[in-house]
Image (cartoon, rainbow, N blue to C red):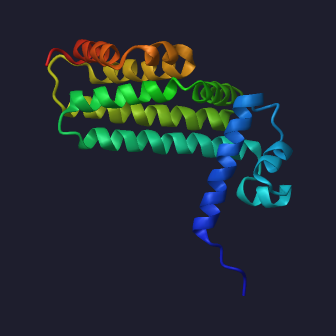
Amino acid sequence: MGRVRNETVHAAKRTEILRAAEGLFVEAGFHQTGMAAICAAVGMSPGALYRYFPSKTAIIRAIVEEERQDAAARLDALDAAADLRAGLLDALDAAILAAADPDYGRLALEIGAEGARDAEIGALIEAGRAESAARLAGAIGRAGEPGADAEASAAILLAIIDGAAGGAGAALASLPETRRRAALRRLLDGLLGPA
């Protein structure tokens, strides 16, 4: 009888590998990071690592999937918000602050570049964006904001988050919280119409 895999231990090791790989991708870039460097970072042999991820591309796919799941969780919280505007303000502010982290931004750019080179990764990234855009537009539409173009509003909000990850987030994050949130509130009022 074969050995039974402990799913908790497996999931924890998988996460450890992903975080180590992310750090290396940020530091040296995807193409300059070999599987040997990832093995060394997590103290595993190549054979052991390949049981978790058969390639660097599989690691990137897993990172993209994690981001999609994180975005879905944020959108679930937005769907549950009693006040769409307050929920959107909180979600947008939190996303900008997260994207302002220079390591996050470098990783996002590295993954985006790989998505441009690898059609499968590009399709995963685009599917995640489309899912987020549709869900965000749905939340805006359900709120019944008069005069709001839900699809365009969602596209603009997601473009702001993408811009924050692309380097603009540091300037936004450096603003005092009250000023940043007041500006975001005005932006939302412009997109959704006055409250």
Q: Which quadrant of the rendered structure holds the C terminus?
A: top left
Q: Residue furthest bottom?
A: 1
In the image shown, does 32 or 144 lie closer to the viewer? 32
Q: Quadrant of residue 46?
A: bottom right
Q: Quadrant of residue 30?
A: top right
Residue 8 coordinates in the image, percent (x, y): 57, 66
Q: Quadrant of residue 29?
A: top right
Q: Which quadrant of the rendered structure holds the N terminus?
A: bottom right
Residue at image location 71% in from the left, 57% down from the top = 52
Exactly how many numbered labels are in the figure? 0
Is 192 drawn above or below residue 23 in the view shown? above
Q: Residue furthest front?
A: 176
Residue at image location 81% in from the left, 50% down from the top = 39
Residue 107 coordinates in the image, percent (x, y): 64, 30
Residue at image location 31% in from the left, 30% down from the top = 90
Residue at image location 23% in from the left, 29% down from the top = 86
In the image shown, does 97 or 46 lie closer to the viewer? 97
Say whether residue 170 is left or right of residue 134. right
Residue 5 coordinates in the image, percent (x, y): 65, 73
In the image shown, does 36 or 115 lie closer to the viewer? 36
